[in-house]
Image (tube, rainbow, N blue to C red):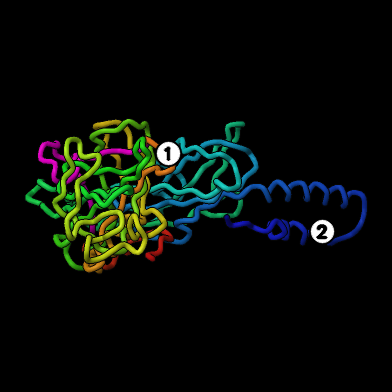
Amino acid sequence: MRVVPVGWRFRPCLSRLAGPRGAARRLALLGLLVGCAAAAQAHIALTYPTAPQTFVPHQGVEIGWDIYIGHGPGTIRLEYSLDGGQNYTLIVDGIPYSGLPEDRFGSYLWSVPEVETADGRLRVLYTADAGGTFHNGQYGEADPTIAITSTPSLEIVLENGLDAYDGTRDTTIFAENTNSNGGGEHLFAGTTASPSARRALIGFDLSSIPDGAQIIAAELGLTVSKTNAGLSAQALHRLTQDWGEGTAKGPGEEGTGAPSQPGDATWVSARRQSADWATPGGDFVAQPSAVATAGAPGATAHWASAALIADVQHWVDQPSENFGWILIGDESQAGSAKRYYASENATAPEGQRPRLTLRYTLSSGIPVELSSFVLE
């Protein structure tokens, strides 16, 4: 957590304490100190963007904020302006905020609308449950200027069976044995009632995206086919080692997988009999690229973030490092497992097999802003 020294906040006020003595002066200075103390508790700022930026329609921009104000829990609202801050349009409202210092930082992935401006603004507002609304700009943090240009972009949807695409690979690895499920019709992530953990591996062939493309939006969709759990958070991590899909297919509802074959990914091996994971359970970036909440059967969970965009951009630029993602559910809670339709599921309706939706531009003059995410 970043801590702003209180003395730094008070310094402008303390600099005004010099001057003639006298009761009136002391009373005035006392009032000034009270005002300074209140100001020290009031800090609302955008952490991204913080400088002039240029965006394009449909671009995924992760707006970040820092709220440090002593008014307790409330909600957060994001807005944008096209006319220098004279009028604002809603982006999202009702984001819960605890008011606790450890929750002062937050973010939201904004899909830039189909508009144009050279004098745009972004604003974050905090409304306290106890009353009062505050926004960036009230305490010295001015709204950053943004531009939105009408650079054309293209969308591509990658899903097995759609427009002859057949580039998805996926499988499940099982913590309790060396089984796999690369040829199965379902993927699993989370923990069974036993409890035993399952993790899903998912990758997409991106060769249809032209060289030099700038990825501006990315979203992965997975549809739940069975679960005994309620809403459950599932984290997507970028894999750092290649792995094998194989043809093993578990019997019945596939919950136990099937004995793996040479080359299959398992809990201990990226490719059985040829390459083990450095860490059992998979080698991946510790920080999730995106987290989504998976729900009831038939519901599609969506993963989208600036980090997910960066993953895809990295793979477009470095195809040899496209190892895909590993999906990890709540492994601290027995019975949290989710079963999803896999790419091999021929009976799943279109849109319910693993689907990666991308949007990109071919204009090298428009930068793709990816917040503060750093590839490891």
Residue at image coords 83%, 48%: 30
Crowding at label 2, few (<14), some or many (≥20) Cα neighbours within 10 Å? some
Please report whichever mark, 1 or 2, sits nearer to the chain's N-terminal start.
2
Residue 134 in view in this figure: yes
Front tag of 1 and 2:
1
Residue at image coords 73%, 50%: 36
Instruction: State the residue position of label 1.
Output: 333
Instruction: Give the quadrant of the N terminus.
Output: bottom right
Q: Secondary structure at mark 1?
A: loop
Q: Position of residue 186 (x, y in %)?
A: 20, 41
Left or right, 90 with reference to 160? right
Left or right, 123 with reference to 356? right
Instruction: State the residue position of label 2.
Output: 17
**Is the Cβ of the residue at disc 1 closer than 8 Å to that at disc 2?**
no
Q: Secondary structure at mark 2?
A: loop
Q: Position of residue 156 (x, y in %)?
A: 17, 52
Q: Is residue 84 magenta?
A: no
Q: Position of residue 370 (x, y in %)?
A: 37, 59
Which one is in front, 38 or 309? Answer: 309
Q: Is residue 35 above or below residue 376?
A: above
Left or right, 69 with reference to 256? right
Residue 292 in view in this figure: no
Which amino acid does the dot numbered 2 rest on? Leu
Which amino acid does the dot numbered 1 rest on? Gln
Q: Which residues are magenta?
A: 336-361
Q: Is residue 346 magenta?
A: yes
Name the quadrant containing residue 280: bottom left
